[in-house]
């Protein structure tokens, strides 16, 4: 095995592979920074380029591009408050407030460092799982996915900002919105109002772009005095501070990476759930939860590490059984087949060297992205000193293209605008937006996998080993939170009493 | 060759005028193929793909687009317009100008199935669309897990099918098999993707799953799945060599319907255009398409890229569409049921 690992490195650093990797990294950066141009579409466009190439250089280009697009997607979230990729939504929550405080450099540094660690964590996990990949995926079916989605629901409390009641209301609205579309079991239209576009449901991309990005843009437009924008010159020297921050919170960074990688392995859960789980977890365990949403560096670190760690996880079911866990992996699977690689035992035996070189490609492209990112942070961070009003036309164009490119349909722009309005109302009246997003994503998963679980196993699925593990985690989490809340209450009561005593 | 093409064009022109198949614009504005081809030179042609980027349809479209562009001296760009299983894009394309600058790559079974079932949302007449030709055709293959006790189609009674949802190709196959083999097997629906349904077959959670050969090949080659039945014309690949065909598995009184279903499945991936295209333009595009599809280097490159092509002329596709759309009520009812869930 060790020999194979080194020979795979040898293949990944041939001049051709490195050249392809560099091209991939540069393209990935552009794709990640521009909202709308997603990783999946770019992969599809790049596949014809790889015809006739050997597998390793081909994947250096494809996977290199894909990994880097996730890292660079965070940049747009921090700089403009518009997620560059749907998986970079959680980064907006604290990255953008930090930017508004003039700490863009620190946020970018922290996101770059945590993304790099997350990505490498995912790659190592992928390598470690090679011997047990197939039995592992054999035990994951609809019930495990349903349980994971329930676990996701338990984070609503910590994602609700101040009020749990408001959070629950917003999450319920999100779940209700997830009902729009064709019923997956009966094929009946639900709340589509005659629009074929709504058959597929409300897409996550226009919602994320409108609810988070659009609302910010509109607010800086409405803001006549430039108050939402501090005129302080961004503190560029903070990049290294951000990097140091990340390593100061190394334990959080590893936990967030693990959440991203493990949830990434579940096919069907999609990439947008894990970022919120990691973010919610970070807030729950933080010593300063009140900072979350107002520029907490821990929020940035958790979001950054998860987004990139998921890629290593995503590759597990793709390699083990040819079951991709999302659109991008589906395209990558297509590339496997074109290059003559059969997912399954072959990728873990005869073609093990290719699988191992994928691990190296992730690591190498991450390193390249960190270097490129570090060089680009300064010029990019300068953009934030441009006044809001000058930036607005450019941002409006980004929002529109971002929403439109989801399905090349104007309907998605309307959806984006509706959620933009909701987003503005939410931030004016202090209603949390993230529970709505989480409800929308989880609602569909909950419904789908509950019915499939029941069709497959009736109620016997409740006692499947994977489900029991998740159930235990949920129970532990609820207990943990209850104890914490009780302690806090007691502490504040005591404080009140002592204050009373003094008076 | 050019003479032949011209002759063919003239013949079609006469034929078209006689049968009136190219309806409105044919009589007045019909141009010669040469004029039409000159008109398309240096233009931008949009090839609409009604599915997400990265899938099989997208891959075929991106493979054919540049070659077709070279042949026509035009630029062919691919545009993905996913939604409603392809119906959304098809509804839009039928309203585009039939000037040759809008083409669409259709999922034959889905396109025709939805049209037969008159499912909600279908706003087009499949027979009136203009067909350029077929790009690929592959049968569906019914599989089970390698560890399953099922060895042939005789063992599948009472077993469960997996499918994404009503109206999907895999669901239609399950409904058709139930009817044709006189079974009442449950169809487990709701899987997010066809790949996920397949994984559940491998895991043994559900027994049977039918989808296109190209999608089944990796699982069969990895030794996780075994083929039970071929639905559609057997194209002779090693994975399905010697596997029983639906037409041979059914009783004599079901042969007619089984043959119709074979036609539906084998309709494959179709290149089409809005209805009412004038014969000159149609001829020019059909000729260019034929040249691409019969070019040896192209066919070989496609096979190497694991996207094998299968060419059928636009005329033959039109015939197939007419046949399928003129199906007896029994088949129409069956397909309608497969869409209703």
Image: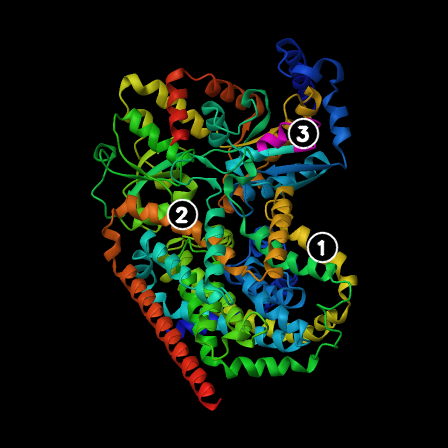
Could you say which disc has been placed on residue B96 in the image? Answer: 3
Q: Is residue B98 magenta?
A: yes
Q: Residue furthest bottom?
A: A502
Image check: A216 left or right of B182?
Answer: right
Do the residues at discs 2 and 1 belong to one chain?
no
Q: Relative to the observer, which residue lies in front, A357 or A110?
A: A110
Which is nearer the eye, A28 or A397?
Answer: A397
Tell me the quadrant of the picture where the C terminus of chain B can be found. top left
Say left or right for B48 vs B86: right
* Residue A121 point in image, percent of width and height: 45, 72
Mark 3 — on which chain does it sit?
B
Answer with the quarter of the image where residue A31 lies: bottom right
Would you call the spot at circle 1 few (<14 residues within 10 Å), some (14-19), or many (20 or more)?
some
Q: Are marks 3 and 1 on the same chain?
A: no
Residue lying at 60% horizontally and 70% vertically, measured from the top left: A95
The first of marks 2 and 3 along the sequence is: 3
The residue stretch that appears in magenta:
B90-102
Residue A396 is tagged as 1
Above/below status of A15 relative to B299 = below
Q: Quarter-wise, where is residue A30 in the image?
A: bottom right
Image position, residue B182 (x, y; %)? 25, 25
Q: Magenta stretch: dominant SS?
A: loop
Foreground tag (3 vs 1): 1
Q: Nearer the viewer, mark 2 or mark 3?
A: 3
Inspect this view and state whether residue B233 appears.
no
Q: Are marks 2 and 3 on the same chain?
A: yes
Quick check: can you spot residue A459?
yes
Q: Residue B195's mark?
A: 2
Please identify the residue farthest to the right as the structure is shown.
A390
């Amino acid at each position: 095995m060790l020999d194979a690992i080194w020979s795979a490195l040898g293949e990944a650093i041939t001049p051709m592979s490195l050249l392809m990797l560099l091209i991939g990294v540069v393209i990935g950066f552009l794709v990640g920074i521009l909202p709308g141009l997603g990783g999946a579409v770019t992969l599809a466009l790049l596949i014809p380029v790889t015809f006739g190439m050997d597998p390793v250089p081909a994947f250096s280009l494809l996977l290199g591009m894909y990994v880097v697009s996730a890292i660079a997607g965070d940049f747009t979230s921090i700089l403009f408050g518009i997620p560059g990729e749907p998986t970079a939504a959680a980064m907006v929550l604290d990255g953008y407030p930090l930017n508004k405080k003039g700490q863009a450099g620190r946020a970018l540094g922290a996101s770059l460092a945590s993304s790099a660690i997350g990505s490498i964590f995912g790659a190592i996990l992928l390598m470690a799982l090679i011997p047990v990949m197939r039995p592992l995926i054999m035990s994951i079916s609809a019930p495990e996915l349903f349980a994971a989605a329930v676990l996701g629901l338990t984070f609503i409390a910590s994602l609700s900002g101040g009020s749990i009641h408001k959070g629950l209301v917003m999450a319920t609205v999100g779940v209700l919105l997830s009902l729009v579309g064709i019923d997956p079991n009966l094929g009946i239209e639900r709340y589509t109002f005659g629009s074929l576009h709504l058959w597929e449901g409300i897409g996550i991309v226009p919602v994320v772009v409108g609810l988070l990005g659009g609302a910010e843009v509109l607010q800086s437009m409405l803001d006549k005095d430039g108050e939402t924008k501090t005129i302080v010159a961004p503190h560029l020297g903070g990049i290294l501070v951000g990097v140091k921050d990340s390593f100061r919170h190394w334990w959080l960074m590893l936990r967030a990476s693990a959440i991203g990688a493990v949830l990434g392995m579940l096919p069907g859960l999609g990439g947008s759930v894990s970022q919120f789980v990691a973010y919610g977890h970070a807030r729950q365990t933080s010593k300063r939860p009140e900072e979350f949403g107002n520029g907490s560096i821990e929020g940035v670190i958790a979001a950054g590490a998860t987004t990139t760690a998921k890629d290593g996880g995503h590759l597990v079911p793709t390699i083990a059984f040819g079951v991709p866990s999302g659109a991008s992996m589906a395209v990558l699977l297509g590339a496997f087949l074109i290059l003559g690689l059969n997912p399954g035992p072959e990728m873990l035996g005869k073609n093990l060297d290719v699988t191992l070189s994928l691990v190296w490609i992730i690591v190498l492209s991450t390193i390249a992205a960190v270097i490129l990112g570090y060089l680009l942070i300064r010029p990019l961070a300068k953009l934030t000193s441009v006044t809001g009003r000058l930036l607005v036309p450019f941002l409006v164009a980004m929002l529109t293209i971002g929403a439109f490119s989801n399905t090349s349909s104007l309907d998605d722009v309307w959806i984006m605008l509706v959620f933009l309005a909701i987003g503005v109302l939410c931030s004016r009246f202090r209603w949390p937006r993230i529970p709505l997003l989480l409800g929308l994503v989880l609602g569909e998963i909950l419904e789908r996998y509950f019915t499939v679980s029941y069709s497959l196993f009736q109620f016997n699925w409740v006692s499947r080993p994977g489900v029991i593990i998740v159930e235990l985690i949920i129970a532990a989490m609820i207990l943990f939170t209850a104890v914490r809340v009780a302690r806090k209450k007691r502490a504040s009561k005591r404080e009140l009493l002592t204050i009373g005593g003094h008076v | 060759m050019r003479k032949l093409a011209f002759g063919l064009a003239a013949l079609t022109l006469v034929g078209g005028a006689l049968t009136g198949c190219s309806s409105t614009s044919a009589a007045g504005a019909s141009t010669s193929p040469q004029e039409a081809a000159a008109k398309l030179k240096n233009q931008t042609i949009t090839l609409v793909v009604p599915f997400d980027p990265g899938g099989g349809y997208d891959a075929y479209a991106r493979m054919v687009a540049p070659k077709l562009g070279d042949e026509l001296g035009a630029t062919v760009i691919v545009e993905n317009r996913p939604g409603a299983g392809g119906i959304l894009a098809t509804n839009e394309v039928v309203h585009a100008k039939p000037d040759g600058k809008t083409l669409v790559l259709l999922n034959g079974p889905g396109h025709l199935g939805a049209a037969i079932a008159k499912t909600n949302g279908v706003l087009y007449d499949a027979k009136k669309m203009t067909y350029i030709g077929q790009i690929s055709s592959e049968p569906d293959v019914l599989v089970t897990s390698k560890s399953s006790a099922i060895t042939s189609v005789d063992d599948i009674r009472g077993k469960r099918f997996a499918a994404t949802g009503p109206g999907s190709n895999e669901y239609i196959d399950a409904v058709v098999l139930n009817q044709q083999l006189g079974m009442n097997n449950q169809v487990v629906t709701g899987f997010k993707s066809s790949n996920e349904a397949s994984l559940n077959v491998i895991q043994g959670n559900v027994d049977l799953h039918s989808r296109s050969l190209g999608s089944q090949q990796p699982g069969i080659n990895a030794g996780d799945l075994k083929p039970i039945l071929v639905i559609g014309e057997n194209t002779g690949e090693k994975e399905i060599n010697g596997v029983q065909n639906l037409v041979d598995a059914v009783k004599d009184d079901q042969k007619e319907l089984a043959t119709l279903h074979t036609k539906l499945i084998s309709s494959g991936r179709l290149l089409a255009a809005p209805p009412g295209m004038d014969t000159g333009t149609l001829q020019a595009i059909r000729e260019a398409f034929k040249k691409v599809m019969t070019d040896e280097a192209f066919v070989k490159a496609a096979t190497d890229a694991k996207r094998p092509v299968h060419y059928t002329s636009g005329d033959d596709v039109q015939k197939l569409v007419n046949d399928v759309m003129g199906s007896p009520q029994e088949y129409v009812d069956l397909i309608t049921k497969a869409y209703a869930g």
